[in-house]
Amino acid sequence: ALQVIVDRLSQDWEEGGGGLHLSMQSPSKESHDTLLHVSASNQHIIKIAEHIEVKKVDNEGFVRPVTVEDIEDFPESGRVGPLALSDVQRCILYAIHRVHFGNDESVLPGYESTIPKGAPVVSSYQEKRLVTLVPTHDEEDLDSLYKLWKRNFFLSPVDKIRDYFGEGVALYF
């Protein structure tokens, strides 16, 4: 089952895969589970951002969609070009969830259970509680955010919260 996930997520984007880079961490004393670390090249992340129409402020102060062709028109203000950590994670998550089984596949590989035609690969394993997705944290960024926030608890650094956790969390502040 694990190899199916790795193969599908690392398959080329143009072939219906995620075009992602995966590395496997075997179970250890600290973690009894096998961990898959998922990443992508900066160029691929920008390509995904264009595909899902991520909008950022360009060098002239206008908010517009990030595109591969116009990436030089955006400031290098984020983790990948203009993209903050939350944008990068959103792109990776999109790439993970866009990968589907073919219409000719009706059995979940490694777990003899039926799946609908064209079912999403990772979601199918999640439904059987065989896979859990957990975004990793950047300790340095998180520590910086914490220090900034504790200086004045009543004035939340909303922009920094949005950049780190995403818009859904920032809306609460």
Image (spheres, grey):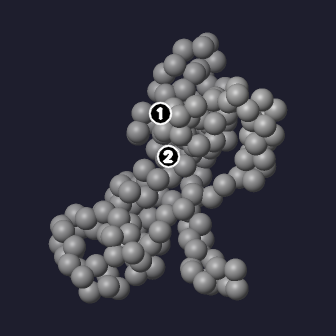
Asked where in the image residue 100 lies, by quadrant, the reply is bottom left
Locate residue 49, reporting x and y percent: 48, 39
Asked where in the image residue 112 lies, by quadrant, the reply is bottom left
Q: Which mark is residue 125?
A: none
Q: Residue at x 60, y 71 (%)?
A: 23
Locate residue 139, reporting x and y percent: 75, 53
What amino acid is at disc 1? Val
**Circle 1 is placed at which residue position?**
54
Picture layout, residue 57 above or below residue 105 = above
Whether residue 53 is visible: yes
Question: Callout 1: helix, strand or loop?
Answer: loop
What amino acid is at disc 2? Arg
Q: Mark 2 and mark 1 in contact? Answer it, CB < 8 Å.
A: yes
Whether residue 67 is visible: no
Quadrant of the image containing the N terminus: bottom left
Q: Residue at x 44, y 72 (%)?
A: 131
Locate residue 44, reporting x and y percent: 53, 48
Badge 1 density bin: few <14, some 14–19, many ≥20, Cα 10 Å? some
Quadrant of the image containing the C terminus: top right
Q: Residue furthest front?
A: 154
Mark 2 or mark 1, earlier in chain: 1
Q: Is 61 on the left-hand or right-hand side of 143? A: left
Question: Callout 2: helix, strand or loop?
Answer: helix
Count all numbered tags in the image, as a single digit.
2
**Circle 2 is placed at which residue position?**
90
